[in-house]
Image: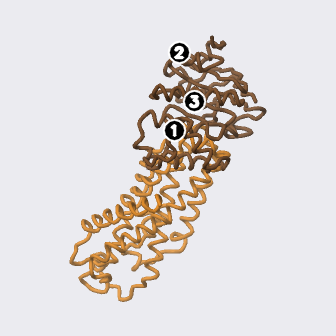
Amino acid sequence: MKKLKTIIKIYFLLCILVFFQSFFGLKKKYACGIDVFVRTQGLAVWYFIVPISVIIGFVFLKNEMNYNMIVRKKNIKEIWLDILLNIFHSGYIITFLLFLSCETIAVLYGNFYKWDETTSLFYMLTRGTLNYLNLKFFIFMYLVSTFFYVVISQLLVQVIWWWTGNYVMGMLVTIGLFAVLIRNGLPWLMRSGVYYDIWTAPISNFYQFIFPILLIVVLIGLGYLKRKRDFL
Amino acid sequence: MEIIVNDYTKTIKGATVLDHVNLKLHSGVCYGFKGKNGSGKTMLMRAISGLINPSSGYVKIGDKQLGKDLSFPESIGILLENPAFLDNYTGYANLKLLADIQGKIKEKEIKEALSAVGLDPEDKRKYKKYSLGMKQKLGIAAAVMEKPEIVILDEPINAIDEEGVVLVKKIIFEAKNRGAIVIVACHDKEELMELADEIVEISAGKIVEKKEAV
């Protein structure tokens, strides 16, 4: 019951964030419902999805990594495993809630899909129109890329905390790193989201799936590699 | 059971917080850690509970070395400086959450522990609404509810009313009498003398004196 209440609270919070994000980011007369989803991806990832993820990760750390919990665990590996499980749980929960929030706000636009018109935001940004939108592909890509962003950003913060003991540093480094990488157009980070460009210049499976999965495996390994010494 | 702290040194960011500490602790004895603020009492408690690892030296719990044979003592209950609980959970829910990690005890024992410190197991108030004394009592209940072999209590009577102090003393004596190693740190000299069988005085990260409480 408590978890459900927390999930509902996060959902409403995300709805408010998505609303403001799309309200300030979209020219209403050109925008459609699908644009709301796009607005939480692409360049917006570093100041939207990443901060939300690391803050939720911070709350977890504050609540679950206290000395009462720690001394009751069998060993250090079990603690790292707990952290990983939490990251993956929050990964799909945040992804689903963000999708639901975007869907909720998208309904407010009335016009769900307008990328086949020259008055659309899509045309404004790509100088082209899209006659056929594969909605299943769109939703699938949105869910996959959001999940990867949530998991990778949280993993990065937790790995930095695991190695240095400093969570705030992990948060700042992660948000900063994503900001720099996305602004400089690193292929995976720039293109994996449901960004307008993806429809005119498809990207490879390597950047879409294999690279993020490899990154996740490496980050998980870094946690197992280091035996955390102090819980201060 | 025996805890051996052997030539234990801990350095954090260049500062030596524990300096070549040697100590032997035995079952059924209550040890009182005495010292000024920042003398290293809490750090030594953290060292014994496995929350920090040594720069040199070691801690042995029985015949197992912390950090080598095991990460944390197998049976330990601790209360350090500030009790650590979830704000939006009731006292009972917080203890249940902790008890479920090892699954050693059930609802009955949790409620008994709450009653023993003078808290109502049916209290529906959330932890964030608790007074300072109630938070402290919940911390003590969490430390002793599983009847651990090692009980570590840092300033257990802080902010607790007179009635509560009597209950806490009773809990400490019970833990000692069932054969646990009890470690208590307390600023109040008289209370410490009353609680402890042996006094361990710590200063600047070193043990300067170990004597029987009189």
Q: Colour of chain A?
A: orange
Chain for disc number 1: B
Residue B3: tell me if it is visible: yes
Q: Amino acid at mark 2?
A: Lys
Instruction: Looking at the picture, tell me which residue is in the foreground, A52 or A134.
Output: A52
Where is residue B14? Give x, y as percent: 53, 26
Q: Amino acid at mark 3?
A: Leu
Q: Which residue is mark 2?
A: B189
User: For residue A118, which quarter of the picture?
Assistant: bottom left
Q: Amino acid at mark 1?
A: Leu
Q: Residues within 10 Å of mark 2 (few under 14, many from 20)?
A: few
Residue A181: tell me if it is visible: no
Q: Which residue is mark 1?
A: B138
| Marks 2 and 3 close (CB-CB < 8 Å) | no
The reply to the same-chain question for discs 1 and 3 is yes
Instruction: Name the quarter where the N terminus of chain B is drawn.
Output: top right
The reply to the same-chain question for discs 1 and 2 is yes
The mark that comes first in sequence, 2 or 3, is 3
- How many numbered circles are shown? 3
Q: Colour of chain B?
A: brown
Where is residue A232? Give x, y as percent: 53, 36
